Each structure stands twice: as C-alpha cells, then as structure tokens.
Image (cartoon, rainbow, N blue to C red):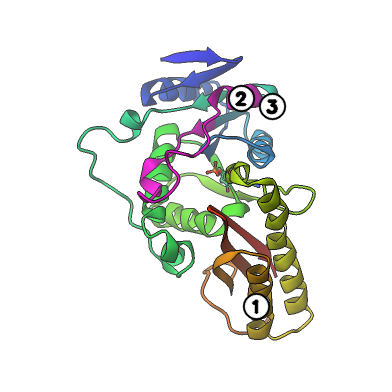
Amino acid sequence: MIHASAAIAVAHDVEALRATVKQWRDAGDKVALIPTMGALHEGHASLVRQGQHEARRTIVSIFVNPTQFAPTEDFAAYPRTFETDCAMLAAIGADLVYAPTAAVMYPPAFSSTVSVGGPATVGLEDAFRPQFFTGVATIVAKLLIQSTPDVALFGQKDYQQLQVIRHMVRDLDLPVTIMGAETIREPDGLAMSSRNRYLSETERKTAAFIPAALRDCAAALRDGSAPAPTLSEARARLDRAGFVLDYLELRDAETLAPIAALSGQPARLLVAAKIGTTRLIDNWAV
Ligand code: AMP
C-alpha cells in the first residue's frame, strides 16, 4: 500500500515498492536508492541530490535496523523523526520513501544473513561492534534486492561500511553501482550525524576536536612525519580533550589493512571515540 505523507509517496512494504519501481522501469527511468535510518540531515540530503543527478527517480529508505545494534547500544533511543524526514525529502524532490516495518524486513522465523569478510574484519568498527556489519550487509542486501536500483549511494562518513558494501556487491554480483559521497560537515568541521543530537552543548563544542585532530594528523603525515608518533600525538590530543578513544588508525584506503609507513598509496585515517555516552566516528583522506 502506498500513502502520501507530507507530499511524498511512502511505501511500507515490498509489494508497494516493487509496483512503483516497475512503473518507473516501464517508463524507462533509472532508479537510485539512498538507504538511511532517518533523522535526516544535510549529509543525507546531499546523497539524495547526488542520486537525482545519477537517476531520474530516487528512493530514500528509512529503517532503523535492529540487527546492527547490540543490546547495549542505542536502538531504542535512536532518533525517529519520520514526518520531518518526509517533509525534507518532499522539499528536495525525492520520489519515494520506503519505510518498511520490522515485520516486513524480518518476518517470523527469519534466519538468513549475509556474512562479510575482507574490510568487515580489519579490526576497526568490527572490533567494537561485532554484530554491526552482518546487520548492515543483510539489510543493505535486502534493500537492494527489494528495490533493484541502478545506483545506490552511501556516505564516506561511514567509510568502513562503504568499503564493506562495495565488496559485498562485487562478491555477490549484485547488479547495482555503488557510489560513495563526500562527508558533509558542520561549519566547525564536525561530520553531520543523526547521533550529534545526543550531544550536550559542551560535548558538541568538544566534538569538533575530532575533525581538527584528523586534519592536522593528515597534514603532518603528508608533510612526511612518521605515522606512529604522529598518530600517538593525535590520540593524546583527543584523550586530553576528554574523549574515550576506541581507535584512531592509519589504513590502506581500499583494503583498510594497517599501514606502518606511507609509500604513495591512498591512505585513510579512521577514528571512533566516545564523548560522554555518545560514540562518534569520522575519517580523513591522507
Ligand atoms: P545513517 O542514516 O546514519 O545510516 O546514514 C545513511 C547514509 O547517509 C549512509 O550512507 C551514511 O554514510 C550517509 N551519511 C551519514 N552522515 C553523512 C554525512 N555527514 N555526509 C554524507 N553522508 C552521510
């Protein structure tokens, strides 16, 4: 069943989604999918605009996926702002919101998951959120199979996730082009995130130390500083600012394998840190 919310069509189940996509396909239109968990911000908006550039039709999925959260994580508290999200997507001119229920995505006796290796097992997010990438890969695979887009867009903000999805799509021959989009940031450099709304005013100010540390660390590495002491200094800086660091690491930009020295290959700094109870992640090209 399709209904209209704040001037945009919303599909809540696979049948409605597929019926709409079929109409578009019959008309010869290309389709872009932007998977999200809602609580939309300018980062999501930029993905939609890029999708509109790639395809005549854009679908934004909004689903807070329970299987990528550990029981100790913020699934229940995750912000849900569906009506505002729909209004924003209508204003941008997206064509369809796909908002399946948990029962649609995980019907009774659901028992099949996508197991991911390679960049999903390099000891970054996977070391701190062991359930995360199986949950992400399974839900993204389902969304891709349900909506059969030509293109699907993901943010570099979740850099390891983007690499995991690229690998999954390649390994499973899913017929879709994955595009990675630049991270949209606040004026002080903080990467936009639905979780930023958890931050107190003081924490919000402190949060800008993350992009500052990444930027300075990347600049020092480019200028030839040795990685080990440069990374230690950046870690100490975040520690002094009050963060509890999960990791700050220099990795090969594609495989995400650890690199001890730069030798001209694309590299990436990746960080995850807690401020208070909020966990933030970010990354920076070197
Ligand atoms: P989320 O709703 O947090 O699961 O994110 C949905 C998509 O938006 C993912 O592909 C994210 O990487 C992407 N995204 C989140 N924040 C940003 C940002 N600040 N800039 C660009 N893309 C983002």
Image x and y of residue 244, in percent: 56, 65
Instruction: State whether residue 94 appears in this view.
Output: no
Task: Work out whether residue 106 or residue 191 is closer to the camera in this orientation and state it.
Answer: 191
Q: Which mark is residue 208?
A: none
Whether the residues at callouts 1 and 2 have beta carbons within 8 Å, the answer is: no
Is 16 located above or below residue 102 in the figure? above
Q: How many marks?
A: 3
Badge 3: residue crowd in 10 Å (few <14, some 14–19, many ≥20): some
Identify the residue at horizontal 57%, vertical 55% (top origin): 276
Q: Choose mark 3 or mark 2, whichever is in front.
A: 2
Residue 264 belongs to the span the image colors magenta: no
Provide the residue designation for mark 1: 231
- Figure quadrant of the N terminus: top left
Please indicate whether residue 54 sits to the left or right of residue 245 in the image: right
Q: Which residue is mark 2?
A: 84
In this picture, is 135 found above or below 261? above
Q: Which residues are magenta?
A: 60-89
Question: Disc 1 residue type?
Answer: Leu
- Single out the residue that lies furthest toward the left: 109
Residue 50 percent location from the top left of the image: 67, 39
Left or right of residue 238: residue 2: left
Residue at label 3? 92
Query: Does the residue at mark 3 contact the one at mark 1 (Cβ under 8 Å)?
Result: no
Nearer the observer, 163 or 66: 66
Quadrant hosting residue 226 = bottom right
Distance CA(mark 1)–CA(mark 2): 40 Å
Question: Which mark sits nearer the N-terminus, 3 or 1?
Answer: 3
